[in-house]
Each structure stands twice: as structure tokens, then as C-alpha cells.
Amino acid sequence: MRGGAERALSVLRRLLAPNFEPCLACGKPVRAGASLPGICERCAAGVPWIARPRCPVCGRAQGCPDCLRPEARERAFEMNRSAVLYDAAMRRWIAEYKYGGREAFAEPFSIMLEQAYRNLVREMSAERKIRYRSPGWKADLVTWVPVSEERLEERGFNQAELIARQMARRLHIPAHALLERRVHTGKQSSKTRAERLHNLDGAFGLLPNLDPRFFRKWDLIGTEKRPRGSFPIAILLVDDIYTTGTTAAICASALKQLESLLGCSVLVYSLTLARS
Amino acid sequence: MKAALYAAETTEGMVLCLTLHAEVDRLWRRETGAKMVLISSGMPLQWAIRLNGTQFGKEAADWSVAEWGRRLRRELGSVLVRENPQTMDSLLGIGSGVEGCTAGSTQPAGQKPQRGESGGESLAAAAQEAACPNRLTGQAERLASLMEGRSLLSGELCSMLKESAPELEPDWKAIVQLAYLRGVLFLRSAVEGSRNPGRQNSGGHRCARCGSQARGGPCGSCGSADCARCEACRALGRSRSCELLLQGRPQARSGRPRSRPLGESAGSGLPAVREANAGLRARLARWKLSAAQASAAEHALRFLETEPLSPAGAAAEKGGVRGTAAASGGQAGVPRSPKSGFKPDTAHYAASDPGSRFLLWAVTGAGKTEMLFPLIESVRSRGGSVLVATPRRDVVLELAPRLRKAFPDEAVVALYGGSEERWRRSGLTLATTHQLLRFAGAFDLVVIDELDAFPFHGDPMLAYAAEVCRASGGKTVYLSATPPAELQSLVRRNRLACAKVPVRYHRHPLPVPERLRAPSLAECLRRRSLPAPLLRRWRTSLERGAQIFIFVPKIVLAEALAVLLRRTFRGIPVGATSSEDEARGGKVLSFRSADLRILVTTTILERGVTVPRSDVYVLDADSGLFDEASLVQMAGRAGRSADDPAGRVVFAAAQNTKAQAGACRQIRRMNRLAKPFLLPETVGRGRLLQVGRLVEAVCGKGCLPFRKPEKKAASERDNREKRR
């Protein structure tokens, strides 16, 4: 009897009390219906969006010497687009998310990523409409940069997978794990540029037991797009931060191995949360 | 993380045991020749801990893999509700083949002397101990002593080992497992599920480290779909269902309780008491306290040195749950809240167990730290360990050198976020309140400084941590100038021992706030003019060479007011600061050195700041953001030094509030209590000053004829006293 009364009271309290969630970044209360869920208006206003990328390859907002290097041409991915600049605030947010275990950041991050994807679609479609008069561009599959077993054990989640899956669910794009991390190389963030460029060699590969049923669906995608012939399949590769592009390039070349399995060409587009 | 599970043969049948390192268990059980059946090569830790200790009958010895799987699932029951049934077997880690092993032969037990464990088991334990490799045994002993009084997540353990005992770190799992088998280390799931999940809206998870509720979700670390993580204590490492929480034995006293100086015996006849009093005074004399300080410290010492009210209860607590398996979940001395939805705070703990707590209610500027010294000395001389917890890092940094100076023989350890001494231990620990989460049953005296300050006040997690870190039979001393209302009412009802220090160390009364009616600050800023009575007072303050502290309720008002003030008082440096100001430390310093004459600030500087000659003005004192405690604290910024003991305090507000009236009443009451301790000349001066100010306010720019000479006299007297 008493328990029942208490429960009724707690229900009443929940109905009457305004539900102010604290902002993930600053702890101030967030109004319902904020543009980025869980982030207060003031913090959301400080997000350094990349509205117009200057480098067509890596999506950087400034000029980009990296992409002018000759070896950059051989990268296996088509292009990278990032949602935001990797400034001090973003560095803090992403560190909270990745190392501090605040998985609640996944939701606003996936929305930021979605924004970047929409920009990419707009960009690609515009080009296509002029050139081919074909309907809009669309990614066929979302996948993500894997983390090693050890890291997964430590963190409890793959930071890229979480945001990729959330975004894919909202956009109704199929999401699937395709890659595995073969060697545990330590954090990229604690390495210098030269170390980063080479320590990842052979670190990524295709998952060994990919489900063949899955590829049949891809055939459907191909025929739907262009009934007569094969069509390149566009894969979105999601990661949290793009710095030198090494991770994206190596993952993309691993994904390119799918071409021989599938018999149609694969184009990899890197989509990252932040561009440093 | 994951843990393996095996069934071990006992006299009654089979019992499930969890292990982090099956090889160690095999060695451990080799001697008894008990059959060991490995059931799971690795399942989510929280499940293994839940299953640990489950008994089965004799028939279990012949069960197949599938049968074990069924049994485990039945045992786990509602825990598995949210799991995907298809992947359940791989998640439980069964199916990889049950392997039995019967190692060694039965050995006649009983050559070794009995150890502290109970009954016939200890014989077997002693025999088993001999069987384990000596090196590992030694390492386990080492680990047990490192873990004494500690409560650490596995990640924290590794980082402690890396620093304190790097040779243990590589195979910590084996060492932990052996220490656990020997009963000197307890393993828990960092977030524990309740027996009936689903009844509470949070899914029934509770953090074993900080006592907060936690929410479940999928986890890549253990694979479970309902692995909860605690958001509340996230800053000190991730507490998860599948994370291992290791708790050591309660801290052992570093020496035998030494006989107290002068042979006191608490609670005996009158002569003994008189003698004891003399002894107490003699010990207090060393610290050169003022009369008021000494009298309060004496009270507190007497409280510390009497035995707990119910020694039988304390003993029962000590020998209770701790010694048995970790699976029972209960911990001795850890208070459990009656209902999981209810979050108890300090007052709740104080009310439930008043015999072990003491409130030292000392006005702002009374010299609380000095009063602590005799208490620390008392506990240390009896071999106990002491913790001084304070809400802010700055205070830790400021207190550490003072404690080191007062106790040159002690290795004072200062713990705070990013501290270098993170894993060091000593008899005297100084820590921010969050660091308490890393201890369990460690301290005989826990001192909570600034009890009513953020973040301690209103955070049930920290109150819980303060309870858990105290050793059973230990005592807690709360320090505050403005104790929360609940504690005050406990004191009034004689439910909580308390000593008041109503006078500042310089023996002058506290400045009583003057209440001034003024339009709201927002109004003033809109009109870009400040009320004349305030301006007049500010001018007087500036003329007498005082620093002006202006408190405003909101951050946005601070800078706006500073701009207005700069325009009004040309040539006078005005600063504004708030919690969002990164240069706050520098501004406070330049305010202290009088490079800034006026500092506009928020409640962030309401405590802990001492500026020699300062007057305090609280604007919008009727704001809901200023409660009685913060008004008293802000008023306490004035008149702190002996050269200028009578600073001025003004509460300017458009309307009267309970908080303002309460703050004034509290200050006046303390001044009344202070009468016996005040310097003879200062008695009644508070009122005289007020009358003087009234005159001054009426006459405009008046000066106080009686004020200056008196101040001079007072400072001369102080000087004389100092020389003495």
C-alpha cells in the first residue's frame, strides 16, 4: 500500500518537475528541442562548423599542403569531409567522449556527422546534375574504422561505430562492420606525423567472415542504380578525427579489396567528425 | 572485462567460483584434490560475480555442458532479460568444452599453525598456501598491504602498481586472484545490479564505488546488452558493471594504540577526569591556541578520545561481512540506504549514527586549521590514520604546507585531481572530497572541511564516499562556519556533539551587516547610475584605504557593474571576476596586493579568500542565489586581519528576505556568544560602530571621531600581544 502511494508520488513528481538535462559540455540546463541534443544553445553556437571546405580532397577549411604532396594522389579514398574544425572545444568534447566514456555525446556527434554527410550529398549531386543529369548522389553503405580488441575492452565502445550507426539509422542507410584491426598500434594521437604515416601499415584488413548474403544486397543496389551495368558502390567510412588521412587511406585500400569479391568497383568516401 | 567461472567440489556438492586467472585456482585447489570443472572461459564479470558462491548438489559433478548452461541461465534469471538469446551461449563463454581437472592428491593437513581464519578451513588454507609458488604468495601479500583501506577499479589498480610496485603490474590478474583466494582482497562488480531489476526506472543498477544510480546499455567490453556505467563518478575512472572493483582489508593501525599521555582513562572516576583535563590542557598548550579555540579543541579532543558508544556494535561490524566472500555484496561499515530511490546526505548519516560525529562550528576567520592540529596529533599518537577532506583543490594546496610545518615528522600526502602523490599513502592525508572514492575503511579520523560548500553539500555521492572511507569505529569531524540547517537542528536537539567557536582569532567581534534599501542592480545598470547611499559608502571605504569586495548574484552583472564603476570612480582600478574567468587567480592576487581597489565578483569568492583590509558589499542581497550560508560567508570576508578587525559589511537589496535576516541574526548570535572571549575594549563596540555609521549615513560624508584612535589602540594592543 505504502509502496503504491510512493510510486504514484514519484510519477507525479516526474510529471510536474521540468526535465532539464544538464549540457554535456558545460553542465548548464538544456532547453527541450535544442538543435544538438544534450548540448545547450550557447555551446552549440560555438561549434566550429566547416561550412565550405577549401581543399576538395580532404575537406579542410584552410589551404592544404598535405593533399598537394605527390603521394597523396595515390590515396585509396575519393575524398574526406569533416563536420567541424578540431579546435580546443572540440578537442575537449571528443576527449570526453572517447577517453572519458561519455557516450551520450554520440547523439550530438552523429547529428554533426549527418550535417557533413548532407553537405557532401549536396556537393556530389550538384556536380553530377551538371555533368550527367543523373539523380542525386547517395552513399550505399556506412562502415567505420575499427578499434583493436584491447581498446574495445578498455573503452567499452567503438567511438566511430557508435556515431556511424546512429547516423545511418536516421538516414536509412545500411550500416555494417567490414574491417578489423589486426595489430594494436597504440593511439595515433600520441604519435608524431612520421610515426603516424607508417605505423598503420597492414594494421587493417577486411573482416574474415563477411556474410555473403550481404553482398547479394549490393548487387541489388547496383542494378537499381543502373539497370544495365555495374555501378560503383559508394561506401562511407566514418571516423572521429582526420589528421593526416593515413588511417582513412589504409582502411580505404582494405575496402578496395572488396572489388575483387564483388566484381564491381568500390568508391570510399571518408566522413569524419573533426578535421584537424 | 570478463571473468572465468568454474565449479569446485566441496563436501556438500559443487560450488561455483569466479576466477580472473584459472591457473592460480588450480594451484590453490591442488592440495585438497578437489575436482575443478571449468564451466565458462569468460563471461561478463558482473554475471560471474553474481554466480560466485552458488551451491549445487552432488549430482552436479556429472552435468554436461548443456546442463551447466541451463543451470547458469536459470540462476541468472532476470539479469539476462535484455540479452539477445541467440548470442547468449557465446556470451556466457560456455560451449568451448568443459574440462575437468583433478590435481594432486589429498595431503594430510594440519602441520601448519592455524591462521586467523575460522575453523577447520584454516588448516586447509594453510596447506594450500604452502603449495602456491612462494613468489606469487609474496606478491599477493604485497598487494594486500598496498590495497589496505583502498577501493580501486582495475584500471586504477594498474596505475597504482605501475607507480608503487612495477614488478607486480604485468601479471596483476594472477596476484589479485591469489589475494582474493586468501581472503585479503575483495572483488566486486563496480556497478551492482539489484536482485529485482525492472522495478526501478533506472533498471536497478547502483555504483558500488559512489552509491549513485546507473543506467544500463550495450557494452563492447563485456558484450552484455545491459552493462551499466556510472555517470556520477566518471571523473575518477569509468565505473561499469563489468569493471572490477577491488577493495582491500580495512586499514590496520600503524602501531599498537599507545597509552595516552598522563595515563588518562576515559569514563572512570572524578579524579581521573580532573587529571585527564589537566593532561588535555597540557597537550593543547603546545599549539598556542586562543582561549576560544582551545576550549573548542578540548571538547573535540574529549569526543575523539572517548570510546564509541556501543563497542559491541562496532566489533560486530568489524568482524562482519568483510571477512566472507565478496559475493555477498555487503561491506562492513558501508551504510546502505534504506531505499534505492532515496539519496541520503550528510545530515542523514549524522542523524542515523550521531555517536561518532562532531561538528566544529567556527565563525569565518576563527582559525579552524589550527584547531585541527591537536585532533590530528591525538589520533596519530594512538597510531590511527587521519584524513582531512576539503572541497576545493586550492584549499588542499594551501593547507598542505601548513600541515607539513605543524607535523614535520609526518609524510603529509596531498591528493587531488592531477596530484603527483596520487598513490602514496601516509598516516596524514589531505584530499579533495572526490578522492575519498578511492578509499574504503581507511581512516580513523575523517575531517570534512567546509561541509556546506560546493561540491560537498548537496552531493549524496560525496557524503557516501565520506562514510565509506572511514574505518569502522572511526570518527568524523565536520568543520563549518555555516552548517546546513539540518545539522543545526540536530545540534539543537542534542543529537550531534558540537563545539562553537564564536570569535575570530583576533578576538574582535564579527562585523554586523548593515541593511540598505536600494533598487535592483539590473535597474541601476539600465539607468546607468548607482544609488547615492552606496556611492557614498564606497567613497568612504576608498578614503579609509580599504579594499572593496562587491558581490553580485550573476556572472553577467559582474562585468557590467565593473564598467559602470570604472566610469564612476575614474582612476580607481576596478576588476571583475567569476567562475568563468581564467585569470581569476591573478585578479585575486592583485586585489590582495591592492593593485585593484574594487573587485566585483560572484559567490565563487565567497569563501577561502582573505584580503587584509576589506569592506564587503552584497548587491541584490535579496536574490534567491544568496542563501543564509553564502551571505554569512560573504560578510565573513570583512575584518579578517588584526590590523583592521572592523570592516564594513553592507547588504543592499530592494526587499527584505529570510536569508538576509537569518544571516544577520546568526552573526549577532555568534557575537553574543563571543562576549567572554572578546578583547575587553571591543565589547559593545559593534553596536557603537553601527550607531556611528548611522550618523555617518545621515550626515553624508562624516567621519567617525571615536573610530580611528580605537583602531590604533587595538592594533597597538595586538602588537603588544604578539611581542608577548
Image: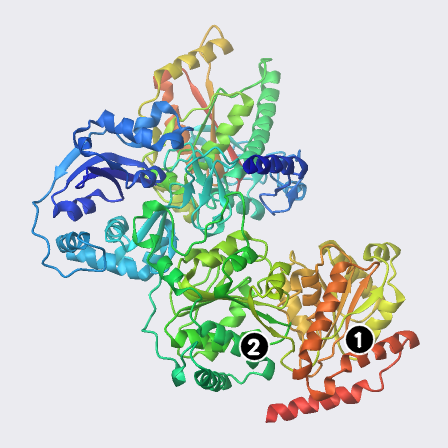
Q: As shown in the figure, which amino acid type bears the numbered disc 2? A: Ala
Residue A223 lies, in percent from the top left, at: 47, 9
Within-10-Å neighbours for mark 1: few <14, some 14–19, many 20+: some
Image quadrant of residue B706? bottom right
Q: As shown in the figure, which amino acid type bears the numbered disc 1? A: Ser
Residue A120 lies, in percent from the top left, at: 57, 27
Using the rendered image of the protein, determine whether residue B520 is visible from the camera's viewpoint.
Answer: yes
Secondary element type, mark 2: helix
Image quadrant of residue B333? bottom left
Secondary element type, mark 1: helix
Horizontal relation, residue B241 to residue B510: left or right: left
Residue B689 lies, in percent from the top left, at: 80, 80
> Mark 1 sits on what residue?
B541
Give the residue at the far top of this rendering.
A228
Residue B532 vertical placement versus B406 (above, below)? above
> Mark 2 sits on what residue?
B296
What is the quadrant of the N terminus of chain B in the image? top left
Horizontal relation, residue B169 to residue B554: left or right: left
What is the basis of the colouring in this image?
A: rainbow
* Residue A154 or residue A82, whichever sits in front: A154
Residue B389 is labelled as: none
Q: Which residue is drawn at 53% across and 38% down?
A: A104
What is the quadrant of the C terminus of chain B in the image? bottom right
* Residue B534 or residue B286, whichever sits in front: B286
Using the rendered image of the protein, determine whether residue B423 is visible from the camera's viewpoint.
Answer: no
